[in-house]
Image: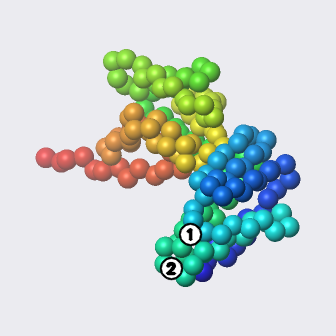
Amino acid sequence: MSRVAKMPVAIPQGVDIVIKEDQINVKGALGTLALAQNAHVVIKNEDGKLTFAPANESREANAMSGTMRQLVNNMVVGVATGFQKKLSLIGVGFKAQAQGDKLTLTVGYSHPVIMDMPAGIKVETPTPTEVVIKGSDRQRVGQIAAEVRAVRPPEPYKGKGIRYADEKVAIKETKKK
């Protein structure tokens, strides 16, 4: 059995989980998330803890039991506390501005880049050079953060661009004569 799948998922107060034959629904303070049920994994709700076990002894069932456990754990954490990614803008004149569900980036192009945020994703700009992306779905928060970063990824010579707050950019030495 997968090492990850051996650990049960604790269900915090205020989170409701409904396990159907084809779907798992998790509802909490920050929203509702759904995940398609996998036939290779047996999920049981025992005393406020979810346990995951492979349905058979195949290698795929063993792997999927750990994967499903982690996906459901991410859903439980997401609807209870949520996820966030912080991005910072490095460069002269680089700034971001959030207005409702739109993010306007001024990052050295001849025009501002306007990005629409999907439902369930909130964007904030505590300072003009900081962007915080929040949501209950971990995968979507990470994907949106990657799309914002892709507008102007950090370049290796001066380090200008949009980067994750904890990202270290290796600065290359310029060419010498």
Q: Residue at x 49, y 50 (%)?
A: 167
Q: Say whether residue 110 is left or right of residue 24.
A: left
* Residue 22, percent from left and from top: 62, 55
Relative to 4, is 164 above or below?
A: above
Q: Nearer the viewer, residue 5 or 42?
A: 42
**59 left or right of 123?**
left
Residue furthest toward the front?
21
Query: The residue tagged with tag 1: helix, strand or loop?
Result: loop
x then y, percent, for residue 33: 66, 45
Neighbour tally class for label 1: few under 14, some 14-19, many 20 plus, Cα within 10 Å? some
Q: Is residue 81 visible?
A: no
Circles 2 and 1, Cβ within 8 Å, touching? The answer is yes
Instruction: Give 137 or 18, whichever is nearer the viewer.
Output: 18
Between marks 2 and 1, how big is the CA–CA gap? 9 Å
Mark 2 or mark 1: which comes first in sequence?
A: 1
Residue in view at x 30 percent, y 50 percent: 172
Mark 2: give few (<14), some (14-19) or many (20+) Cα within 10 Å. few
Q: Position of residue 58 (x, y in %)?
A: 50, 79
The amino acid at mark 1 is His
